[in-house]
Image: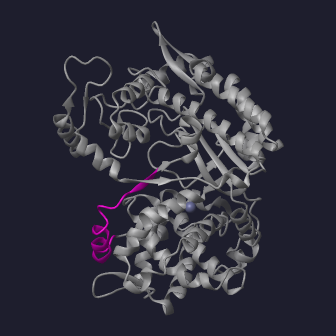
Amino acid sequence: MRTQRHAVMILLFLFIPACAASTGLIRGKAPADHVERQLGKLAPVTLGHDLSMLNAKEAETLRLLVRAATCMDDAFLRQVWEENLALREELARKGDPLFIDFYKVMYGPWDRLDEDKPYINELPKFAGANYYPIDMTKEEFRAWVEAHPHDKEAFESNFTVIRREGGSLEAVPYSEYFRDQLEMAADLLRKAAEKTGDSSLRKYLAGRAEAFLTDDYFRSDMDWMDLSGDIEVVIGPYEVYEDTLLGYKAAFSSFVCVVDRKESDKLKMMEDCLNELESNLPVPDRHKNFERGASSPMKVVDLVFSAGDGRAGIMTLAFNLPNDERVREAKGSKKVMLKNIMNAKFDKILTPIVSRVLSEKDRDRVTFDAYFNHILMHEVSHGLGPGNITLDGRKTSVNVELKDHYSMIEECKADVLGMLNLQYLIDRGAMPQSLEDSLYATYLGGMFRTIRFGIGDPYSDSAIIQINWCLDKGGFGVDEEGRIHVNDSKIKEAVKELAHELLMIQALGDYTGAAAFKEAYCRLRPEVRALLDLLKDLPVDVRPVYPLEKEVLEG
Ligand code: ZN
């Protein structure tokens, strides 16, 4: 806490005030070299898709969807801060490209990559964003709901903002508060629904247009699960992470995507093998689990435009929606994997990492194909291994028993089974033999990207565990120059033994075992830390440049 405050003070000290005579919102800015450094952490990438495979009607539908998505930009900007639209306009008028570019990623005057420190003006970001009155506390909200039980549902709704009216608090529905943005979005969605030849898409878009005006998203969330054409789009209020005060309010977001049929079919093939893969797990048969419910659908797509919450800060590799538990119970949820973002992160982040940390012999063995297949199989592998378990006659589940260690063990399991299962499919002839040559070097390189998320992150902790385990088992080694490599003769066995270890912790719901395992393996060793030190100046993420945005909005 102390260091954080210290950092803010330094930043404020360096702030450059705008000229005293200036009017408008911008009173001061962080130094340009600071903003340039921060923006430099995000490598720009062009994200497109060959639209010639879509017929003219669908291509036109896609353009309408891009325009509808930009309404989510405007609505989300207002959710972050009421003055945001005016600030955006002022930045555009003053024409400072560096600050305009940075603002486009940050969706407000606060730096999302640096604990929301302000880079324009000195106003700290309110934890409740613009969802609540800026002077409202959690306690006041709770006391109000306690004293006015009939307000509870509207106050805790995902789709209202709270406003202060005289001496009291009131809930205003999104459809009213964001009327300008939502009416325009609804209009464009209706036009897109008329245009498309895809009946599943038409149903979703028409339903979503209505939801924007009624705040009832249930029906169209259900329809979204059934999309079956070439366009995959999600638009509306979804995640609640921007509301760090209470976690109730959903942020407007959109992802406009084109389905990759070939990769989606491959994913389907992997899922169809679930029972066979379960049989192959290195644990006694009594711990194998053939009674999982039908798994949720997964799709592979290329992202051609994103907006609002879906574009702010770090770019996601995949999303899993909807969040409405009623839909999840009826239809599960859908996982959409963004292949061109994965490709961009591979080129801009993983490739430079690999060239610095891997031994010479392994550098050229790292391929996008192996990286991508491992991500797909990681997702499929979450559906394998113990889920509901019985301990001394008591019915329980792995996540209940492993508590705070669950995420780390589960992510580690998915990574390791991802490798084990790909090797199994290669051996069985279902995946090409050539994949084996790149698989393990890519796996090793990929973990150095993940560790950079920081200690305590379940993905990062899981990567540290895998590296240490494989170093101890001789599956990985460090050369004289301090670079790391794969030992082909030992890696397969190391992966299998680790899979056994993790699955047994899960099968036995062994909390103490999980804690001991973490204690033994989740420590950054000096040889690994030395390699991480070589990566400090590399970008941490990508920021999208969408050709379709240019064409539709500027062309
Ligand atoms: Zn995972």
Residue appearing at x 83%, y 42% in the figure:
199
Q: Nearer the viewer, residue 531 or 192?
A: 192
Decide if residue 4 is in sight here.
Answer: no
Using the image, determine if residue 378 lies above or below residue 32.
Answer: below
In the rendered image, residue 325, in percent from the top left (x then y), is placed at 68, 42
Does 17 sit left or right of 326 as displayed? left
Quadrant assignment for the N terminus: top left
Is residue 540 a member of the stretch shown in magenta?
yes
Q: Give the range drawn in magenta.
A: 524-543
Where ligand 1 lies, by image quadrant? Answer: bottom right
Using the image, determine if residue 348 lies above or below residue 142.
Answer: below
Residue appearing at x 70%, y 23% in the figure:
214
Give the image quarter of residue 528.
bottom left
Q: Which residue is situated farthest in the front direction here? A: 555
Using the image, determine if residue 380 lies above or below residue 364.
Answer: above
In the rendered image, residue 505, in percent from the top left (x then y), is placed at 55, 71
Q: Which of 142 and 28 is in front in this view?
A: 28
